[in-house]
Image (spheres, rainbow, N blue to C red):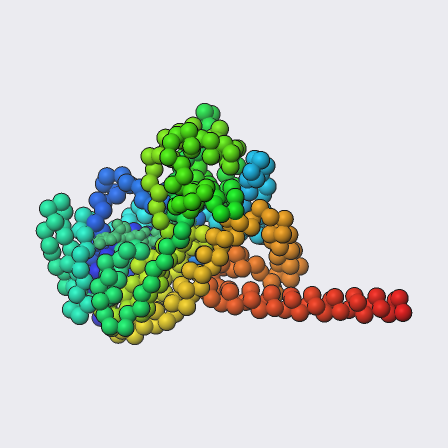
Amino acid sequence: MGESTSRIAIVGAGLSGALLACLLGEAGHHIEVFDHRRDPRKKGFAGGRSINLALSARGIHGLARAGLAEVVLADAIPMAGRRIHSPTGRVTFQPYSKNRGDTINSVSRGGLNMALLEGAQKYTNVRFRFEHRCVDVDLQRPSVTALKGAGGRPVEFDVDLVIGCDGAFSVVRAAMQRLDRFDYSQSYLKHGYKELVIPPTLTGDFAMPADGLHIWPRGGYMMIALPNNDRSFTCTCFWPFTGPNSFDALTTEKDVRDFFTAHFPDAVPLMPTLAQDYLANPTSSLVTVRCAPWFHGGNVVLVGDAAHAVVPFYGQGINAGFEDCVLLADTLKEHGSDHERALQTYYVGRKIHADAIADLAIANFLEMRDHVASARFRMKKRTGRMLHRLLPRWYTPLYNLVSFTLIPYAEAVRRTRRAKHVLRIAGVVLVLLVLAAASWVFR
Ligand SMILES: Cc1cc2nc3c(=O)[nH]c(=O)nc-3n(C[C@H](O)[C@H](O)[C@H](O)COP(=O)(O)OP(=O)(O)OC[C@H]3O[C@@H](n4cnc5c(N)ncnc54)[C@H](O)[C@@H]3O)c2cc1C
């Protein structure tokens, strides 16, 4: 191993922690990964917040860096567009892109985590410590204190660098929040989410086409569904917690059946256990977390949701998290033992883009919920695709820049704003030319 290898504690063996363990393991660092869960490889994956997720270009790039893209994509289901369900049950398909290869990919969250854990386990210098709950981090030493096993015996680990990959409610970040001049904000949507299932048909087929992301937009609330490998769909209801058309409004099986029959009529026959599932499954909240800075000296740094949890409506949470992992691994390599420089370079390189995707995710929530079904929205998307086809070098829709390229998020936003500005000017010039021509003809 080279001179610049370090002892690194990664807190969290979720998606970003496990990818980082692969990348830093490969670089020869001595890695200890802590997670309070049981080892999912031994006990079978106990589930998590959502059963599947959409992986796109950025996530695939991160996996490719760990040599895992092919194995993960082999089990993925490509989704080439949105399938919009109207209140009467009519379904229309809106492709994401003019390019056939531009798809987002539905992958099993558990399967992805497992592939990453197995990928990291190849390195003898990576050690997983499951059933270790991190309870504190000493930012100066630095060290991690964890409670081990069911008895909760406290154990301490001194390392050179602590990386917080422990999600939106990060304990590593909580330690940093005690520092002077550490910025932190969290904001919850008034909407939460609940997961339901559309099982395979009796003949073992998908109950709906599996080539797209299904959306039932209803203005103010919506349901979506992504296909799974076992030919089921995971549906997610994004509704307000309280008020009309809310989770609180449905308290009996009859309420649930009546509501779904009125608002999602075509889904009801496909969901035989709808009412029981609805009442049994939890309703969870959706939070955006922003903080700054993401590092403390050369000792501690945050990655993934621990640094920037975003709401899931652009399908970019872990895609952004994997971009963090790649950049952090690269900056640590570039700056060797100068961890402080590496962490600062990583933070400066990512913060502006994490803020950009947080804003885009909230804007996309409103778009998916309220606009995707409207004629105006469809016309806008069609115009975007047409411009992309006619002027591919000059115009690419924002969704495509975010989902199908590696162009940094804030740069994607900037390019889209600039293109829209030019389009507006071109529109005005066109109108003036038409008016001038008309006045010349009719003079
Ligand atoms: C409903 C929903 C749908 C989503 N859909 C998508 C999507 O389609 N595409 C997408 O890219 N993203 C999606 N996301 C976002 C994505 O799930 C997150 O961005 C991603 O899981 C973040 O990964 P992470 O590894 O940073 O954190 P997490 O997945 O939260 O992992 C954190 C890990 O840390 C461990 N941990 C936590 N605290 C401690 C502790 N004190 N001690 C030890 N271990 C600890 C946990 O057990 C866990 O293993 C969705 C999110 C939600 C809620």
Say left or right for 188 vs 429.
Answer: left
Residue in the foreground of this view, choosing between 312 and 226: 312
Residue 29 point in image, percent of width and height: 24, 63
Which residue is at 53% across, 49% downward? 370
Say left or right for 410 vs 382.
Answer: left
Residue in the foreground of this view, choosing between 10 and 169: 169
Residue 426 point in image, percent of width and height: 68, 68
Which residue is at 53% across, 56% downward? 400
Task: State whether residue 345 is above or below residue 224.
Answer: below
Residue 240 point in image, percent of width and height: 42, 46
Say left or right for 62 vs 170.
Answer: right
Q: Do we see residue 267 in this rendering?
A: no
Residue in the foreground of this view, choosing between 422 and 260: 260
Which residue is at 30% across, 59% downward? 306
Task: State whether residue 361 is above or below residue 80.
Answer: below
Q: Which quadrant holds residue 143?
A: bottom left
| Extreme residue toward the top, this view | 202
| Extreme residue toward the right, this view | 443
Say left or right for 309 vs 267.
Answer: left
Q: Do we see residue 214 in this rendering?
A: yes
Which residue is at 34% across, 37% downward? 281
Task: State whether residue 425 is above or below residue 66.
Answer: below
| Extreme residue toward the front, this view | 243
Residue 288 point in image, percent of width and height: 37, 57
Residue in the foreground of this view, choosing between 130 and 226: 226
